[in-house]
Amino acid sequence: MNAHTTSTHDPRDSRTGLDWPRAQAFLADERVHYTERNPRSRALAAHTAQHLLFGVPLHWMNDWGTPFALHVDHAQGAQVTDVDRHVLADFCLGDTGAMFGHAPGPVAAALQRQATRGYTTMLATADAAVVGEALSARFGLPYWQFAMSATDANRYIVRWIRAATGRDKLLVFNGCYHGTIDDVFVDLVDGRPTQRASLLGQVHDLLAHTVVVEFNDLPALEAALAAGDVACVLAEPVMTNIGMVLPDDGYWAAAQQLIRRHGAMLVMDETHTISTGPGGYARAHGIVPDALVLGKPVGGGIPCAVYGMSGPLAESAMRAKRDAPPGHSGIGTTLTGNMLAMAAMRAALTAVMTEAAYDHMLARAATLAEGLRALFAARELPWCVTQVGARIEFQFCAQPPRSGGEAGRVLDAELEHLIHLGLLNRDVMITPFHNMMLVCPHTTEDQVQQLLQALGQVLDQITPAR
């Protein structure tokens, strides 16, 4: 899941070309329309508020900017049907969890087969061998372990690397997310590392063990690594959680040299950038990490995640475990690698995340990206469009940001929510955090055109009348 990062953005920057009073009137009308068209969701929201914190299973489900939470009846392929029987073209896809479509056939069949054969035993199955082999072939790392989420996988790989290297510091990029691993909730505020104020209940000083620099800033990276106390750099190859930030040409080649020169390790979090292709962004662009994390989509939406290690790192990690005192390592949970998740991952890796699926996804994504650029150009909106494989995002600035700091300064939650609500009322759903869209193997050309038409209608209501 994504999360907004606090910024000091001046909304006038993102609202260039808009008629804001007209946009505010449109938003008021859309809230009324949403309420009128979703009576069943409204009733369920009122009922669940009696028993669930914030009225939803996870408080992030309130982040859509809607008057009350939308409730889903079922989801299939690239469509979500809500409880009021609206069929929505889904470009959110569970915020990447359903990147390959809702309830993909091979995963559904695998879960049905496993349903009467046990869910968890804390023992290995034949599926584990197949999954390990498929991961090694796909990503080029020989050794793998499992987790229940990318958050856990990131937490575990950082623990393993700290144990293996004897170093305690983690380096991340300003505006990163990497799930809810506490260590990464450090930002640069006016150039100074600052623990994120939104991190509820954290009593420890993260600044003692977390170093933060801007993405694409090689001198800052080198300076941060020079002390020789950084265990690993945890990074997405393309930043995706604060609006997409692409690496400069040659950035990762130079960054890898710096990381290795100073004895640190590189961890690539490909949970979102697996949208690039079957082997993720790193493999497609010649990045050779020491470890890799992949969460949500690897099991077709079933809760599971994986993390892989190079041979030398795996050897050091196993040595650290053997040399440690007996007792619990603090890495893993009882349900890690359970039978149901392994069956789902085997089906997803061998029959869903295929070359043919990516061919379809990339073609549809390219059509969508070009359509978005045409929409903005026709209305003279200075907004840019960035594509990473099947992932597309538009940002409220003319040129793509080069760092998390730049990306944070153009976030405009009010404008985002206005756009997202307008789309929902036109039976189109995109991710509620910034303006991210995904296409899956089931996304049709008609759905792409539906999204473009709906967004065009929204833009026509918030730009000066023609």
Image: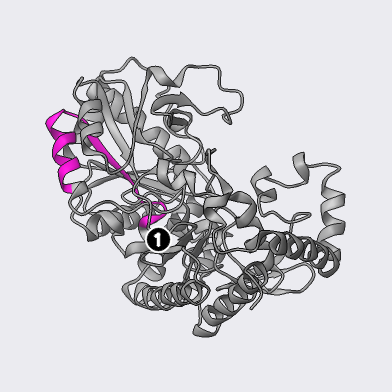
The x and y percentages for residue 300 are 49, 61
Residue nearest the viewer, comparing 417 with 337: 417
Q: Which residues are magenta?
A: 253-273
Snapshot quadrant of residue 364: bottom left
As drawn, which residue projects farthest toward the top? 325
Q: What's the image's color scheme?
A: one colour
Name the residue tied to disc 1. Answer: 346
The C terminus, quarter of image: bottom right
Snapshot quadrant of residue 198: top right
The x and y percentages for residue 31 are 78, 61
Snapshot quadrant of residue 175: top left
Residue nearest the viewer, comparing 145 with 178: 178
Q: Amino acid at mark 1?
A: Arg
As drawn, which residue projects farthest toward the bottom? 446
Question: Left or right of 149: which side holds 214?
Answer: left
Residue at 31% across, 52% down: 132
The x and y percentages for residue 223 are 22, 27
Q: Is residue 254 a member of the stretch shown in magenta?
A: yes
Secondary structure category for the residue under label 1 = helix
Residue nearest the viewer, comparing 155 with 325: 155
Whether residue 279 is visible to the viewer of this picture, yes or no, is yes
Residue nearest the viewer, comparing 252 with 127: 252
Residue at 50% across, 75% down: 375
Whether residue 122 is visible to the viewer of this picture, yes or no, is no
Q: Is residue 59 above or below residue 322?
A: below
Give the crowd class for mark 1: few <14, some 14-19, many >=20 residues within 10 Å: many
Residue at 48% across, 66% down: 438
